[in-house]
Image (cartoon, rainbow, N blue to C red):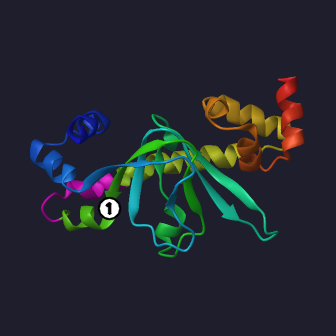
């Protein structure tokens, strides 16, 4: 199953068989139960997870003591990679929890294991960067959405860029992600 997934998911990278088998040696699938935590607040995250099946999200505790949803993830999209790039690049413990919303299958890639293969396979450095690229695009789109001036505009932009989120997650999660009160969110959704 890993071979087929790797060859399909990274087909544009033109990996040689030797590179594919080296990657397969450090990748592993893991199934998570509904609401199970993938990464914890305070943990140093050195694993990149790709969502193969299911849905996941991250939460962060804000200064007001309320937990807010900070990202929503689902397969075959810009948000299929579940990873805290911000804390990873700053080399600090995670400020977020990452959980699965429903039973999910993730493909886990240990970054340190990839780095040990750099000497033998220099292109793996590009692979790490290539995995980060969609997250950068996602961050830029999220900034655009979250800078919407009104609740209506935020919801409209999210629906435009990520319509599948509205099929996968409860409205309360989406409202939390957008920073919109759930009653306001419901009123806006009823008017769309």
Q: Which residue is mark 1?
A: 110
Measured along the vertical axis of the image, is residue 164 above or below residue 36?
A: above
Magenta stretch containing residue 23, yes or no? no
Q: Is residue 153 left or right of residue 138?
A: right
Image coordinates for residue 45, horizontal then vertical, percent: 45, 67
Q: Which of these two is toward me, 87 or 50?
A: 50
Give me the residue at 53% from left, 41% from top. 55
Q: What is the magenta range?
A: 119-128
Mark 1 surroundings within 10 Å by alpha-carbon count, few (fewer than 14), some (14 through 19), many (20 or more): some
Screen quadrant of the N terminus: top left
Q: Is residue 150 at all visible to an observer of this figure?
A: no
Q: Is residue 121 magenta?
A: yes
Q: Nearer the viewer, residue 175 or 28?
A: 28
Q: Magenta part mainly helix, strand or loop?
A: helix
Residue drawn at the location 72% of the way across and 34% of the way down: 157
Quadrant housing the C terminus: top right
Residue 34 rendering spot, x and y as whole percentages: 54, 46
Question: Outermost residue toward the front?
Answer: 33
**Element under label 1?**
strand
């Amino acid at each position: 199953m890993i071979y087929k997934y790797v060859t399909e998911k990274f087909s544009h990278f033109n990996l040689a068989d030797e590179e594919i088998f080296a990657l397969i040696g450090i990748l592993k699938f893991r199934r998570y139960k509904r609401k199970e935590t993938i990464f914890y607040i305070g943990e140093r995250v050195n694993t990149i997870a790709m969502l193969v099946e299911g849905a996941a999200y991250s939460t962060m505790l804000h200064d007001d003591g309320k937990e807010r949803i900070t990202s929503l993830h689902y397969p075959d999209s810009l948000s299929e990679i579940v990873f805290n790039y911000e804390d990873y690049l700053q080399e600090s413990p995670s400020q977020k929890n990452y959980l699965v919303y429903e039973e999910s299958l993730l493909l886990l890639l240990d970054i340190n294991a990839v780095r040990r293969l750099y000497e033998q396979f220099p292109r793996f450095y590009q692979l790490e960067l290539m995995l980060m690229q969609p997250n950068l695009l996602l961050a830029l789109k999220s900034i655009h959405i979250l800078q919407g001036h009104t609740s209506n505009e935020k919801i409209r932009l999210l629906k435009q860029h990520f319509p599948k989120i509205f099929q996968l997650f409860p409205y309360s999660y989406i409202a939390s992600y957008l920073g919109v009160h759930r009653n306001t969110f419901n009123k806006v959704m009823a008017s769309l």
